[in-house]
Image (tube, rainbow, N blue to C red):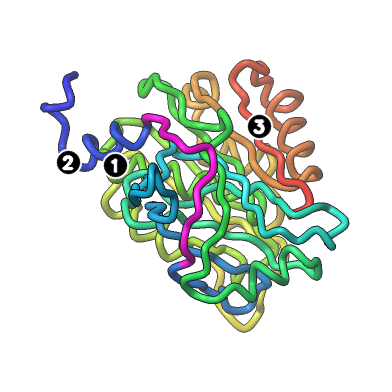
Amino acid sequence: MSTDNKNPAQQNATKASIPTRPLKLQLKLLEKIQHPGTDVMSFKFARSDSLNSNAGRQENQYLSYKAGQYCIVNLGTREDPEGPVRSFTMASSPTEEDFILITTRIRDTPFKKKLAALDIDSAVDISAPLGKFVLHDENSKPAVFLSGGIGVTPFRSMIKYATDVRLPIDITLFDANRNQANIIFKDEFDSWLKIKPKLKIIYAVSELDTSTEWKGEKGYINKSIVERYLDSRQIDSSIFYICGPPGMLKAMQSLLQDNLEIPRERIKIEEFTGY
């Protein structure tokens, strides 16, 4: 299909998938968002870098990436035992043209403290996109996402992208969290359910808030929960994506390979460590 036959969102996404230089950009912080009842914060950065110059002339550089990729943020915190840089998935979609979104837990480390304290309009060194944890190209094969906690960030990017460009792909997300407050993107996900055909989202929480009604799944993602929402055809043909902390990742690998007998070549993994 030629670019001319695509809708505007598809045309923009096509352009956004082409790598650009430089390898490092300075992007301004546009907005900080504290998610109530959690230690999670989101940061919106501009996608255009107007701080680099070429032969004395200002030159805009645009951060282009594929849904699910990550970038490296350098805050210069050399006093941090883990160093001055961290890797963050871009939770935004390439179709969101004005910003990139980074969402993370704020820990008691020099890096995370400095990140949380950044002033609006601060310029931050951010690398060009990295990583191969992206949607497969064959839309006839369903995608099943298994996320734990903040590991949902690449799936926010992929689902938003698939919704905006109207990808004809069947997507199911199993989103496991400690409690309801930690379902970070629930409002957005629920709104996309109304406009994205073939999208299904299953929320599971391990700690129930007895003061509010909960209609989702209780406990951790297991074989019975997966089989409740996926039929045998979907299980046998889907590409499975896992993202979360090491313990969750290991449990989901065992669930897929040992209990559901999914071959390794149909499983994609992204591990979150030290987040």
Residue 62: x, y in percent? 37, 45
The tag earlier along the polypeptide, 1 or 3, is: 1
Q: Which residue is the site of mark 1?
A: 197
Mark 2: which amino acid?
A: Pro
The tag earlier along the polypeptide, 3 or 2, is: 2
Residue 272: x, y in percent? 71, 45
Q: Could you give the CA–CA distance between mark 1 and mark 3, rounded to whole angstroms?
A: 25 Å
Residue found at the far left of this picture: 4
| Circle nearer the viewer, 3 or 2 | 2
The reply to whether dot 1 and dot 3 touch (C-beta < 8 Å) is no
Residue 109: x, y in percent? 80, 66
Find residue 269 and name its label: 3
Q: Residues within 10 Å of mark 3 (few under 14, many from 20)?
A: some
Q: Please determine whether, in this image, residue 242 is positioned above or below residue 160.
A: above
Q: Which is nearer the eye, 98 or 253?
A: 98
Is 136 on the left or on the right of 242, as rendered? left
Q: Secondary structure at mark 2?
A: helix
| Circle nearer the viewer, 1 or 2 | 2
Which region shows up in magenta?
A: 18-29
Mark 1: which amino acid?
A: Pro
Q: Secondary structure at mark 1?
A: loop
Q: Which quarter of the image is occupied by the C terminus?
A: bottom right
Find residue 8 and name its label: 2
Is 22 on the left or on the right of 108, as rendered? left
Q: Secondary structure at mark 3?
A: strand
